């Protein structure tokens, strides 16, 4: 039973890497993760902005096998148990694009073991172990919610920045129009007060 408790705690504290990055047009960005045999590797990724929202994604094992592959996708996820110990490489390719870079948000989780708590029978679980299992589920939900809120905050920041730029240009244009109309009114009213001499 202590083993089940340790497995559940290990799942709660599995390393998670959530990050955002840019893949340049015609370029490729790769990340490597050192993984032990039988560890679970999972990841979610999504193209946030940049032209046509698609990328090619590949996960390669230490032996060179393609564990996961996606072509021209805007978002995706992968999960597998490592068969070999070593460095697994996750590559995001924007080779098809000629002009637009892609902004990508990704989350990679390494080190989760299989759900050992599920293997035990309900009558074997002590109340503490049951609480740890619920805590684990809750923490994963909170982590996913935080990632989602971070992505939403980044999107709101982008929209706010763009709106500020448009308002600045609109204000400059409005000031220019007001000055032009004022000058026209002054010249027009001045023409009423000019004395015309008849020769």
Image: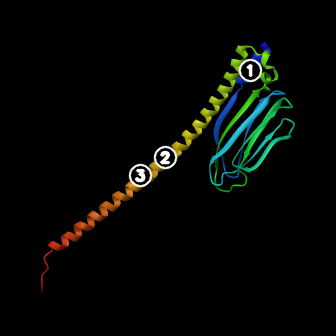
Please name the residue that numbered disc 3 is placed on: 168
Q: Position of residue 192 (x, y in %)?
A: 17, 73
Q: Is residue 61 visible?
A: yes
| Earlier sequence position, callout 1 versus callout 2 | 1
**Residue at 70% from the left image edge and 14% from the top image edge:** 128
> Which is more toward the observer, 26 or 110?
110
> Which quadrant does the C terminus fall into?
bottom left
Where on the picture, by quarter, is residue 173? bottom left
**Residue at 46% from the left image edge and 51% from the top image edge:** 165
Where on the picture, by quarter, is residue 37? top right
Report crowding for label 3: few under 14, some 14 to 19, many 20 or more residues within 10 A (C-alpha). Answer: few
> Which quadrant does the N terminus fall into?
top right
Q: Nearer the viewer, mark 3 or mark 1?
A: 1
> In the rendered view, how is the structure colored?
rainbow
| Earlier sequence position, callout 3 versus callout 1 | 1
Q: Position of residue 186 (x, y in %)?
A: 22, 66
Q: Nearer the viewer, mark 1 or mark 2?
A: 1
């Amino acid at each position: 039973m202590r083993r089940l408790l340790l497995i559940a705690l290990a799942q709660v504290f599995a390393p998670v890497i959530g990050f955002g990055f840019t893949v340049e047009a015609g370029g490729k960005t790769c990340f490597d993760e050192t993984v032990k045999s039988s560890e679970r590797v999972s990841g979610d990724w999504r193209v946030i902005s940049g032209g046509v929202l698609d990328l090619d994604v590949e996960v390669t094992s230490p032996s060179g096998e393609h564990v996961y592959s996606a072509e021209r996708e805007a978002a995706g996820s992968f999960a597998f148990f490592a068969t070999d110990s070593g460095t697994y490489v996750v590559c995001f390719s924007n080779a098809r694009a000629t002009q637009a870079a892609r902004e990508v948000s990704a989350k990679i989780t390494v080190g989760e073991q299989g759900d050992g708590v599920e293997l035990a029978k309900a009558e074997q679980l002590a109340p503490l172990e049951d609480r740890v299992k619920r805590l684990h589920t809750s923490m994963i939900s909170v982590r996913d919610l935080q990632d989602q809120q971070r992505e939403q905050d980044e999107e709101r920041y982008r929209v706010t920045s763009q709106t500020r730029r448009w308002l600045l240009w609109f204000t400059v244009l409005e000031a220019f129009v007001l000055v032009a109309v004022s000058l026209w009114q002054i010249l027009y009213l001045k023409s009423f007060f000019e004395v015309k001499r008849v020769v």
